[in-house]
Structure formats: C-alpha cells, structure tokens
Image (cartoon, grey):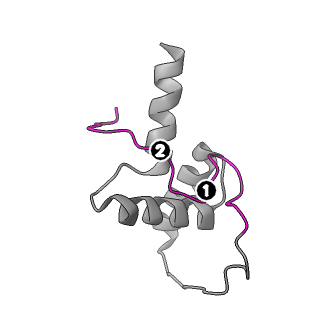
Amino acid sequence: MVDVQEVSSPPPGSRPGGRRRRVAGGRGNRNTVRFTDAEQRRLEAAAAAAGMSVPHLLAETMLASLAHGERLMAVAERRALARQVAAA
C-alpha cells in the first residue's frame, strides 16, 4: 500500500506516460548513474509499471522532487495510486 500525503502533478515539460516535451536546443547534458543488478531490476520494474523508460522515470521523479522542494512519492507510486483511485 502506498502512504500518500499529497499527489502532485507532473513537473513542467513532462507528459504523463509519454515523452518529455521538446526543448529548443535539445537536452545536451547527460549524467551517469550506476546501479547494482538488484537496483536495476527494481528500476526496470518501476519503469514498466509506470509505462516509461528507466531514464524517463529517473528524470521525471528527480525533477518533480526538485520543483516542489520536498520529498514526493515516486512516479510509479503516484500512477499506481491513481489506478487504485480510478478503480474504486
């Protein structure tokens, strides 16, 4: 079960479940993050549940957290909660 205090909207420039919006000049910056095999499997499962790629999941989750200055629930958690609410 997901513990939720607040469900927020996606960060500006993102589209839920789809590609992020294009920006003039593109996104030329790249970061490299390393994960253990177990962590990678968790990321892949979360991304699949959210209907997005691992890089998109990481970017959207981090940018949402930075945009609001507080810890937000992960994208996969928000989407799972939204599905539960819709099913109720």
In depth, the one of 54 and 29 nearer the eye is 29
Q: Which residues are magenta?
A: 1-22
* Kind of residue at disc 2: Ser
In depth, the one of 84 and 35 nearer the eye is 84
Q: Position of residue 77 (x, y in %)?
A: 44, 43
**Mark 2 and mark 1: span between their CA atoms?**
10 Å
Residue 81, quarter of picture: top left
Q: Residue at x 61, y 87 (%)?
A: 29
Q: Is residue 20 magenta?
A: yes
Q: Residue at x 48, y 49 (%)?
A: 75
Residue at mark 2: 9
Q: Residue at x 61, y 56 (%)?
A: 14
74 relative to 41 in the view: left or right: left
Looking at the rendering, in which quadrant would you find the N terminus? top left
Whether the residues at callouts 2 and 1 have beta carbons within 8 Å, the answer is no
Q: Position of residue 22 (x, y in %)?
A: 73, 67
* Rendered view: 27 above or below 43: below
Q: Examine the residues drawn in magenta and state their main secondary structure.
A: loop
Q: Which residue reaches farthest top?
A: 88
In depth, the one of 36 and 26 nearer the eye is 26
Q: Earlier in the sequence, mark 2 or mark 1?
A: 2
Q: Residue at x 63, y 49 (%)?
A: 48
Q: Which mark is residue 43?
A: none
* Rendered view: 50 above or below 21: above
* Kind of residue at disc 1: Ser
Q: Is residue 12 magenta?
A: yes
Q: Which mark is residue 14?
A: 1
Q: Position of residue 71 (x, y in %)?
A: 29, 57
In depth, the one of 16 and 87 nearer the eye is 16
